[in-house]
Amino acid sequence: MSNINLYQQWGITLDLALEAHELLRGATGQEIPGVKEDKENYPYATVTTITILSPEGAKIMQKPIGRYITIEAAELRIPDPESQRQLSDLLNQKLQPLLPKDDQSNLLLIGLGNWNATPDALGPRVISQCVITRHLYKYAPEALTPGMRSVCALTPGVLGITGIETAEIIRGVVEKIQPTAMIVIDALAAKSVDRIGSTIQIADTGISPGSGVGNQRIGINQETMGIPVIAIGIPTVVHAAIIIEEAILKLFQSMKMYEGLHPPIINEIINEVLAPFSGNLTVTPKEIDSMINNLAQLLAQGINQALHPNVNPSQFNMYLQ
Amino acid sequence: MSNINLYQQWGITLDLALEAHELLRGATGQEIPGVKEDKENYPYATVTTITILSPEGAKIMQKPIGRYITIEAAELRIPDPESQRQLSDLLNQKLQPLLPKDDQSNLLLIGLGNWNATPDALGPRVISQCVITRHLYKYAPEALTPGMRSVCALTPGVLGITGIETAEIIRGVVEKIQPTAMIVIDALAAKSVDRIGSTIQIADTGISPGSGVGNQRIGINQETMGIPVIAIGIPTVVHAAIIIEEAILKLFQSMKMYEGLHPPIINEIINEVLAPFSGNLTVTPKEIDSMINNLAQLLAQGINQALHPNVNPSQFNMYLQ
Amino acid sequence: MSNINLYQQWGITLDLALEAHELLRGATGQEIPGVKEDKENYPYATVTTITILSPEGAKIMQKPIGRYITIEAAELRIPDPESQRQLSDLLNQKLQPLLPKDDQSNLLLIGLGNWNATPDALGPRVISQCVITRHLYKYAPEALTPGMRSVCALTPGVLGITGIETAEIIRGVVEKIQPTAMIVIDALAAKSVDRIGSTIQIADTGISPGSGVGNQRIGINQETMGIPVIAIGIPTVVHAAIIIEEAILKLFQSMKMYEGLHPPIINEIINEVLAPFSGNLTVTPKEIDSMINNLAQLLAQGINQALHPNVNPSQFNMYLQ
Amino acid sequence: MSNINLYQQWGITLDLALEAHELLRGATGQEIPGVKEDKENYPYATVTTITILSPEGAKIMQKPIGRYITIEAAELRIPDPESQRQLSDLLNQKLQPLLPKDDQSNLLLIGLGNWNATPDALGPRVISQCVITRHLYKYAPEALTPGMRSVCALTPGVLGITGIETAEIIRGVVEKIQPTAMIVIDALAAKSVDRIGSTIQIADTGISPGSGVGNQRIGINQETMGIPVIAIGIPTVVHAAIIIEEAILKLFQSMKMYEGLHPPIINEIINEVLAPFSGNLTVTPKEIDSMINNLAQLLAQGINQALHPNVNPSQFNMYLQ
């Protein structure tokens, strides 16, 4: 129904490749050239890997060539210990193959986002639960558990508070400490509220300009950083303009009107209802604070396992602040 | 157009008496029996006082008998020092007459809300900038500036974190320390996004059950507390269900359809778009964190002036933590 | 060597009954009438139970009649998972017999202390990791795991910030919600730096006036609250005056001077060195922030197990914020 | 009496040049070659400028060649508005001449220290109250007040949490954004408790290795950063080993013993009393949290005035988060 370009007037990008692909394939499920989709089913989750193979596919999807692995599980929102364990194991399983093989390499973790704006706080909250070891390698190697990798981390804050683009801070640190690769954790915006807190996206293409709840201005990826960048994100918001559009389109559908069209009236109404904030309003669940705490813990568990695969997870707690 | 009862199915109350009154008066501007409205214009603001005079008015408005003073100013969102000063002076001017005349009385300030969920953090952030003196009266009166009143404060957290209703905590403290009156600060939900951060409501009826972003279960008012309770609130969110309803009604209006009716299709669409969260989704601006910081500072300035009217505001900073 | 009354001029009480008993018994190890001491050895810890049996013993010890259980373990400072597990099990084992037998009873947890002053933040940090269930009993019993007890919690802040004595807040809440018993967690002051972070004291006598890092003005105990109060504390500081006194006494001992005496010169020197802060200076380790995080986690684990003994600890995480 | 080298065995450096100079000059007040001292008296403060002029002076003082301006005022600890204003004006007056003349230049502010360890939180708390403008220059110049300089800021955390040396993070950012100069704010350790919270040191030599409460491993200065670095610090702690040493030396003095000597017994006693923490214990006032809040506000006011001298201070609030 909708065309992916329509979101651009609101400064909205579709962070989830899965949603972009769904949208473009439309009701007919047409194939998008240069884009491959594979699905795997697990007891607790569905894993969909979307691979953008060609510049043509990248242009249509408005996402760079690369792999986008999506773990979908409604159980992500329910902190039941057994499903949580299975889901962090699954994250570990999907993340590990993307990491440098050499376990002597140093990895840099980045928690993007604003600590003080709850829906945007996912990145920093994940980082606070990750096992950091680089300083131990340097100053106290006897304190390490055998098998641990060298990992360091940064939460660069946001441009409006520091006056410095996060990409500038990150690039500066990368040039100084020369990590082998980077994992960036960020809160995303989804197109549909049922994806909030129930979807994890792992992308080996890093962070594209305009993406995330914070709308990163400058990309954080192989091009800008010079090293592989893996992005891990979970949607915590939907843009308000999108849910109004979705509601109106559903109304048209139920009234059997305007099929296939997207009349200007929709934009006029969005503008009126959301004035004076327009594209700067987001929709988020009331329980977002506890939801993000659970998700941060799950992501951190999966990341710790993937970074230190030869270490018993019971040892991780000892290294946390 | 809409009927005030329609919000109830989503567990939504209209926190702003001004919005409830507008809605009920409808397009024709009909008078609501037992409800009086007065407007005053200031350079930076409009002040509307809605007085509910009779049980009939209370029933229609679904709000208790009492006074609801609304300060509306788009400048509330812009931290320009001159307008900020005029607006906190205006808050002081409207709040003072509601306070106990006896300046020997002790006042209790309550910051309702969850520190960790940004749109709900207004109450606690205001309290952290209020001048607290009750312990100085007791232990170090020489540290007081002459003219200061005895003021104490509490931020009772939320039921989901403490396991205790905030009203239970507050009532227990009120019975112990016997304040003469209470001021409760809370984040509100508005019906229209242009009221977010641009409207202050002062109500001498306290907090009604179901109100605020946190949906207080038990009221905090003269009935439950035994002392006068003044509620001060600013809207920081709009319920997602309401903006979808507003968009659809505007569509109907523009298409000259279904005037005066509210077809079931609207609720079906709201349910579909907001599943599985339904009534638990809120719309808030991206810059909510810095917006709430500015508003908290402005409210605290006005409250400090109203509580200690004979003290030069330059002295307040000395007492802040 | 020293007399317990000498600390009073600095406003210092000995929070640890173990230290008070050691001090009074002196080098000769004389028995203190009305005070019994029992020691148990465990692989990771020594547990000493001091029971004050009579008013005479209470007067000499300057502590109320009751039981003081001290767990001493240097491993408390090392977050090794195996010893941490054994130590939280030991805490559970010693705490459970002090709790009400009736598992239908409601327990209130209090985290005393100031979130923002790191050495005094132990209480609040413990509470944030405790399983709170009272609201689930009331509103969502199906969300409870069978065997869970009703538990609620409060972190009342400090007098200097709220203007309200913590005992007033707690008493008010106790009268409202009528818990069967209370557990209060607080940071303590020790006499010797090697007890910092290596000692847990469980006392069935609650919190005495003047105790803890925050020097509680009003006691929190059966007398003031009307219900049993169990106090759990870990020393995080030593008063600066005490370490100067200890150093000077060791000097005298090594120079074989002034044995058994406590000359006025000691107080003069303490006053000079600590001016202008005198009794308001504390000694604490640089790594106090991470130390308190580890200790808070260990205490919370032990408390959760003791409160919900029939629940598998793997279920607790689901209930944490 | 004491020799400056004696502190080194405890890993202690004297952060305040004023204290180092006093110590070296001893009771006789002998001149130190290559070191000049000038004193100015103000109503609320004494300003002492120590200039190290030669390599010989640098070697004896164990501080680099440069200027060390110390503002001493007991009123720094008392948040009286009039003296606070005069003291931030004085800071502005002494700081401005050290800044680049070109007001088109970009300045980088660094808040060293650990947010979560209260005595070490001064740097981050100051930064949070500084006016940041660099992003406005880039994206919204119309939002600037005429006369404002381009300022950005960073709080790099601590090695134990990030795994990255703060100097590495800062150097990386400096190379990327090329500021003209840097101001680093840090909490210091003093030799005497009466300097806690009553002394501001401004040094045009940046941060030397080993200095500050956090014991910076790598220096942050012109040599390591390639641009001028001005360090601003206030003592918030005294090392515990130092106060024991001071107490024992005073005892010897009063007993007319061991004049001019520093017997090994002192180190033995320090080791015994402070075991097992030895050099890692600090002495700090109980009210350190509110003290640091007041000092952070005062420092930020002075820094904002010095950075934007042509802007009315009433305009600053508009730019704060």
Image (tube, coloured by chain):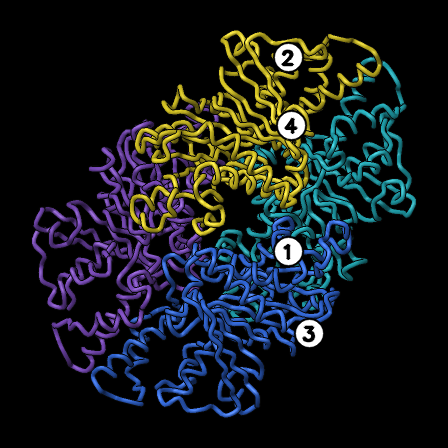
Chain colours: A cyan, B yellow, C purple, D blue
CA distance separating discs 2 and 1: 47 Å
Q: Is residue D277 left or right of residue B91?
A: left
Q: Which of the two labelled residues, at mark 1 and mark 3, occupies the earlier sequence position?
A: 3
Q: Secondary structure at mark 1?
A: loop
Disc 4 is placed on an element classified as strand
Badge 2, how many Cα within 10 Å: few under 14, some, many 20+?
some
Q: CA distance from mark 1 to mark 3?
A: 29 Å
Specify whether B266 is left or right of B158. right
Which mark is on residue D312?
1
In front: label 2 or label 1: 1
Amino acid tagged 2: Leu
Which image quadrant for residue A310? bottom right
Chain assignment, label 2 = B
Judging by the rendered image, the residue that carries numbered circle 3 is D227
Horizontal and vertical percent position of residue A137: 57, 68
Q: Are marks 2 and 3 in contact (CB under 8 Å)?
A: no
Residue type at numbered disc 3: Ile
**Tags 1 and 4 touching, CB below 8 Å:** no
- Cα distance between the residues tagged 2 and 3: 66 Å
**Residue B248's x, y, as percent?**
76, 18
Q: Residue at x 78, y 49 (%)?
A: A208
Dot label at residue B41: 4
